[in-house]
Structure formats: structure tokens, C-alpha cells
Image (spheres, rainbow, N blue to C red):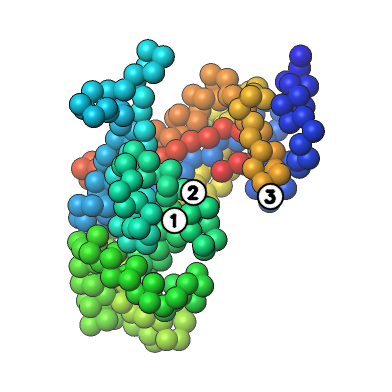
Amino acid sequence: MSAVAELERKVGGTEVTLSTTLRSGFVAPEGYVLASIDYSSQELYVAAVLSGDQTMLQAFKSPEKLPLLDADNNPIVKDGQAVYYKNPDADLHTITAQGCCYPELFRNQPKHEWVGIAKDASLISAKGSARDAAKRVNFGICYGQTAQAMTNLYHVPLALTEEWLKRHKETYPDFHRFAHDVGILSETRGWSLNKDGRLRWVAEDNAKAAGASPARSGVNFQIQGYSATQAKLAMKYVFEAFQGTAARLGMMIHDELVCIVPGKLTLVPDKCKIENGVLIPIYEPNAEAHQWAKLCQDLMEKAQAETFDHIWPGRAEASVAKYWSK
């Protein structure tokens, strides 16, 4: 049975459509694949490193999976294999969902179920899951979002967003101290100097918009400016590695690098997914495509580790597809 016929068998009578996103309009030419590599929660990682917040840093250095233990702390084994669960301490958004946004969902619940609880969209009345809300809160507060702004954007009561902000400060105290100190300096000086030695004027008369907050702009520059340095250095390394080869650097979008590299793909029907009536085809790359993607991933991680003075490792994720999929 062909891969396409097998996919048709899997889909069966389900009415689905292929993805129609703008990204899926970018298709690799024959004999090539698109390798998408991006930094994993880059700006939050940068914020954690710059602020030295131990809870944030713990999320980036904790193992992503842990063995499930029984009441006697012995590993649970199923079919001869140890059973693992996703470690909630390794997911910053789950930490925020549990500690700041919806702590009642996790109360008296076993820790190995926390990630699943955080991702369950049926447990809260707002759109999305508790983790979705926590992700918005993490990035919003990272850039100085107020409780009133969160209320306006997320359509939740002000009393609730005020509580979110209060708990966030208690959960990540070192980050909030860092943001406060940078903000005060930016307001006083009218400029912000980041770790690279680059300076940005943040006083209102030099800002992009009237009424812009010098404090908020100063913190933004510390994080986004440093993130941009990592992305540019990664692009330089990948461009140099591609010289004299058939691989091409396609584009850099924020913290994601899209490359056109030699390789082939095989459609795997059993791994294809249907999400909200949209078919998500899953391909297995051959060794050549995988090697190119791994090279790009390694170079991006090298650039990030280098800007972190090799104290913290780089974190990048790679995927390979016929079209731009990430």
C-alpha cells in the first residue's frame, strides 16, 4: 500500500483539509527540504540568565522527563520499560500556571499530572488552557505588561490579573528585581546599555512612540537586544558553514532560522495528525536531511552558548519538512 493510500485509510471518512497557513506556502524544491530551527523560549531564557532568577533558570536546566515512582520511590515499569512523565519543573509555563494563574487546578493533584492539567483546555472558562494563559503572562510581564493591560487583552477581571502579577513577583523575585533596577536606571539616564555594550536611547523624546515608557523600553532592550545578538551570530555561523555547498540560508524570522538543504522525506501516515479538522502531515527525513538540520541546530546552540560566556548551554529545536512547518 502506498503512503498516500495508507494516509487515506487512516483519515477514513473524517472530513479534513490540508493546512492553508501562509507558512505552508513555502515549499522546498525537488531534492531539497526545509529545515526550521528556532531557539527554545529564547527571550525567557535570556531574561533568566540576565536576571539570575533561580526559579526561571531551574526550568531551563531541569530534565524534561522523570521516571514515575511508586509509593516506595521505586521506578514503575511497564512492558519491561520504565515509565516517564513530563517534569513540570522543566516547563516555565506550567510553573506559572501552577504558581501564579490557576493554583486551584493543581491543589492535591500528583505532580506527574501537572503538565497534563496545565494543557487541558477544558479546565478553565477562558479560551485555551491554563498553560496558554501562563505563557501570555510570562511573556507579557517579561516586557512590563500591567495588570490593567492583561485585563484588556485577555478579557479577565482586573482583580484576577492583579493577583497573577502579585504571584508572579513572588514566584520570580530575582527577575522582578532585575527589571525594576533596569527600569529605574533607564528612566534616570534616558538610555539603556545592554550586556553587549550596545546603547539605546529610551527617553520619550527619543522613543518610537509618544508616551513610551523609558523603563519598559530599557528592559525590552536588555532582553530583545541580547536575543538579537544570538540570532545574528547564529545566522553568521550557518551562512559560513553553507559556503561551497548546495545548502542555502533561507530567512531568519525572529528567533527561527529557515534553511533549504539537500535531502529527502518519507510520509509517515501513522504519525500524521488531525488538529481541528486540519491534516498535519508528518515526514521522516533521510540521513542527509537530518545531518543538515543537526548541523544548523548545533551552530545555533553554539552561538547562544557563546553569548552566555559558555556558562549556560544553547537550546534550539529543529524540524524538517517539505514545507515551512514550524
Q: CA distance from mark 1 to mark 3?
A: 26 Å
Instruction: Give the residue type that dot 3 points to.
Output: Thr
Q: Is residue 198 above or below residue 189?
A: above
Query: Which quarter of the rendered picture does the C terminus lie within?
Result: top right
Q: CA distance from mark 3 to mark 2?
A: 25 Å
Tell me the SS state at disc 1.
Answer: helix
- Residue that numbered label 3 is attached to: 21
Task: For marks 1 and 3, give the one nearer the viewer.
Answer: 1
In the depicted view, which residue is nearer to us: 234 or 10?
10
How far across and down, in percent of the image, does residue 307 sit? 29, 48
Relative to 166, 160 lies left or right: right
> Can the viewer see residue 40 in this picture?
no
Q: Is residue 136 above or below residue 235?
A: below
Tell me the SS state at disc 2.
Answer: loop
Residue 236 numbered tag: none
Q: Is residue 21 above or below residue 201?
A: above
Instruction: Name the residue located 42 percent from the left edge and 50 percent from the top edge.
Output: 118
Task: For marks 3 and 2, give the one nearer the viewer.
Answer: 2
Q: Which of the 4 quarters of the picture holds residue 259?
A: top right
Question: In terms of sequence position, does the residue under pointer 1 or pointer 3 come before the other?
Answer: 3
- Residue that numbered label 2 is attached to: 120
Instruction: Give the residue type that dot 2 points to.
Output: Asp
How far across and down, in percent of the image, does residue 250 sit? 58, 43
Is the residue under label 2 in contact with that under label 1 (CB below 8 Å)? yes
**Neighbour tally class for label 3: few under 14, some 14-19, many 20 plus, Cα within 10 Å:** few
Query: Which quarter of the rendered picture does the N terminus lie within?
Result: top right
How far across and down, in percent of the image, does residue 290 sit? 52, 25
Question: In terms of sequence position, does the residue under pointer 3 or pointer 2 come before the other?
Answer: 3
**Neighbour tally class for label 1: few under 14, some 14-19, many 20 plus, Cα within 10 Å:** many
Q: CA distance from mark 1 to mark 2?
A: 7 Å
- Residue that numbered label 1 is attached to: 130
How far across and down, in percent of the image, does residue 278 sit? 70, 43
